[in-house]
Amino acid sequence: MEITVEIAKMKKLIITVAQTGGLHGKDINPALPEQPKEIAQSAYDCYNAGASVCHIHARDRQGHTTGDLEIYKEILTEIKAKSPIITQVGNGIGAVPRPDGSRTAASLDERMPLTVIEPKPDMLTINMGTFEFDYIDTFENPMWWNEDFCKRCNERDIAIECECYDISHIFNALELVKRGVLHTPVHFSLVLGVTGGMPFTPKLLATMVDTIPEGSSWQVITLSKHQLPSTVMAMCQGANIRTGLEDNIYYSKGELAKSNAQLVERMVRIAREIGREVATVEEAAEMMGVKRE
Ligand code: KMH
Ligand code: ZN
């Protein structure tokens, strides 16, 4: 895909906030929202700061990562009651505690029920290939399962975001397009810097962007110290961006972020400085083919 460099010709910027994640918790940054009301308040603050999409993971009452649909229900209900921000549930769930004391990646059987969450999320994330996630576990995302997941999203009119950790994952997404289950334009998230996937370098990002078809939308997801520079780069190339404590617990080196909204506010300031207009929720929904209830 051609990279746009003229700011005036760029589409409006969609800012996604990934507030919670499925790995770390309040133990490493107390500002990370874990409980439904806290997640909804943080989403409201991020919406007011300029985010149009809220990427969601659930935690149980103890703050442990969970696939409990009742908790997702509470989170979605609370978010929707407070703001019109687009809701996007991450289908990876994260690392779940097990009775033997270990924590392992949520299984395919634990993850498929996310397609029936009530109230309906606006979007669901699909992770586009199986790989070893950060030495933690095998992150299983087989093609047959992604195809089934996609079909179930289509049945409920849930829009899809495709997270690609490797160039081959882009081709996996395109295969689903060929099979007629993933609709175009595809919304790619290019995830760089997860051990087991591709590392972040500007060259690798450019190669990935080069691989995705014209007309797609893309955003970059990177972790920790790479997040600010990579998102600024993406912003200057007409892409969307994602920020939030799921991906980066710091505001600057050694300084913890005070909130998700603080990270969103910074991205909005930078967008304004470079002349990139920030999309409203309505504009983002239109651009991503999100059908609101
Ligand atoms: N933490 C991201 C790198 C998901 O939610 O399904 C992975 C993620 C996946 O966002
Ligand atoms: Zn996620």
Image (spheres, rainbow, N blue to C red):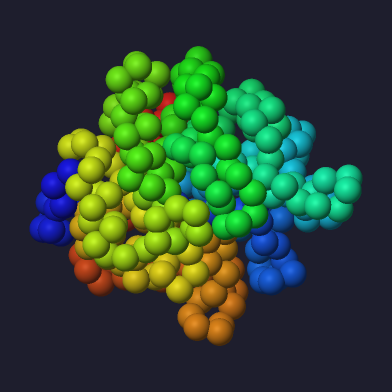
**Residue 65 can be seen, yes or no:** yes
- Of residue 1 and residue 86, the one placed in the foreground of this image is 1
Image height of 21 relative to 258, above or below? above
Residue at left offset 25%, top offset 40%? 212
How many discs appear? 0
Image height of 69 relative to 260, above or below? above
Q: Position of residue 139 (x, y in %)?
A: 58, 43
Residue at left offset 53%, top offset 35%? 141
- Of residue 182 and residue 157, the one placed in the foreground of this image is 182
**Residue 156 can be seen, yes or no:** no
Q: Position of residue 106 (x, y in %)?
A: 69, 40
Spot the residue most to the bottom: 254
Residue at left offset 67%, top offset 71%? 29
Q: Position of residue 260 (x, y in %)?
A: 55, 64
- Residue 228, by quadrant, is bottom left
Q: Position of residue 263 (x, y in %)?
A: 48, 68
Residue at left offset 64%, top offset 23%? 116
The quadrant of the picture occupied by the N terminus is top left
Image height of 261 relative to 161, above or below? below
